[in-house]
Image (cartoon, grey):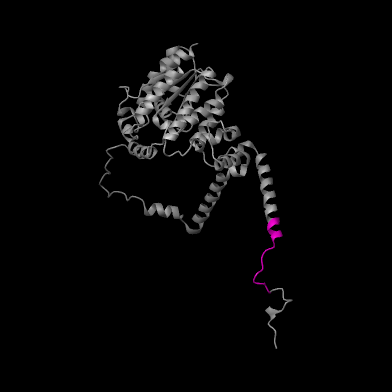
Amino acid sequence: MTTNVLERPSDTLRIPPDWKIPRSRFSSVFVCALILFVVLNCIYSFCDRSFLNRRPEQTNAGTVLDHYQALTKTPDVVIMGSSIVKFPFWMSDQLHSGGVPTFDDFGWCAQLEKLAIYEGKKPLTIFDFGIDAAMASDVYLCCDRFFEDNHRPKLLIYGVTPRDFMDSLLPKETQTETFKRLYSMGDVLDPSSLFQTNLEEKGDLTFRKKVPLYRYRRWWQERVANLAQKAEAKLFGKSTLDLYNFLHSTPDPPPGIPPQPPKVAASWIESVAEYEARYARFDYPQMSRQEKFFEALLDMCKKRHIRLLIVNMPITHAHEELMPPGLLAQYNSWLRVTALNKGTELIDIQYAPEFSDASFRDIVHLNGQGGDELSRYLLPKIVQATQH
């Protein structure tokens, strides 16, 4: 009887049906991978800091914080808040001079400095620390990190609106880019800290702080994606993204028929859609937490002898109509009572007659004309605070 070659016990090609990789091999691979991971992290940690500072995404918050941390001298006046305090002075500078930096890179308020020097007859510096979509918790954290001892400005101006305390697009204050950049392990592990985190958030923040490969993982992912897109373009001529954009693009109007200009500015329409999303639901717990950060900021400024000026910023009726019912009334009442109880100066220009719809570039942000009006309100306070 002929024996099949594959059935011979001595044949090395025969693979038993229940054959598996030995567990020892798994252990060896895991140990090698772990050692490689640790070695790469150590190398990465000792790399040139300029390389490590390349963030996966150059966000507005990252740019503003890098700009302020690079300063060698504390400005006389610091203006804080969200984009509502950056747009007015940025657009005012564009209105009066050329060579103004981009929105993200803008910091020094040149036009406001000129007005203040002319009024007070004394040179001074004014820095706009506005961070896009900053919450009260972000402002508190920035002040806590930067304004201490000899690094205190003569005057701190904080412009606020209801969105600084309630934003449906932000699930929690520990998810902001500012917090991820400035937090310390004490903010995460201290149970008495205002920044409360669950176990999953503690793990993520700990890994971001201690493991460079985890912290900069998106930087590498972005570059791998770019390489893949370039390879795709070389192989197929056009990427699938370009093809999608071509198929979904709006055709040009027939020749001889000029396109009709929109009746409403595009920035106005876009801001309506954005703030509909930001006010999609009234998150009472979030607003309560942000109020605590605001009150802690006022206490901190008093303790550190920082003169603080709160500005209740102007709003449009279109902005007001998008807010959940009761939000604006609750916010205004709480803001006035808190400022009074804490002994903090408050300028309320929410409905100041100088600010009409013509003063806004969209339903939220003031334009250059609105920036000039805002400067006129702040100028006496700035001169008074910096002349002593």
Viewer-nearest residue: 55 or 322: 322
Task: Tell me: residue 355, above or below residue 198.
Answer: above
Outermost residue to the left: 257
Name the main secondary structure of what is drawn in magenta: loop
- Where in the figure is residue 313, as x and y percent of width and height? 38, 25
Is 10 positioned to the left or the right of 179 in the image?
Answer: right
Residue sitting nearer the eye, 377 or 141? 141
Q: Quadrant of residue 158?
A: top left
79 displayed left or right of 369: right
- Is residue 203 in view? yes
Image position, residue 207 (x, y; %) = 60, 42
Q: What residue sits 40% from the left and 32% below the top?
A: 163
Q: Nearer the viewer, residue 17 or 223?
A: 17
Viewer-closest of 101 and 202? 202
Q: Is residue 117 left or right of residue 37?
A: left
Residue 385, image x and y in percent? 47, 14
The span shown in magenta is 14-28
Is 251 located above or below residue 168 in the figure? below
The verdict on residue 80 being magenta is no
The correct choice, above or below, for 368 with respect to 206 in the image is: above
At 30% from the left and 30% from the top, the residue drawn is: 317
Magenta stretch encompasses residue 16: yes
Q: Quadrant of the N terminus?
A: bottom right
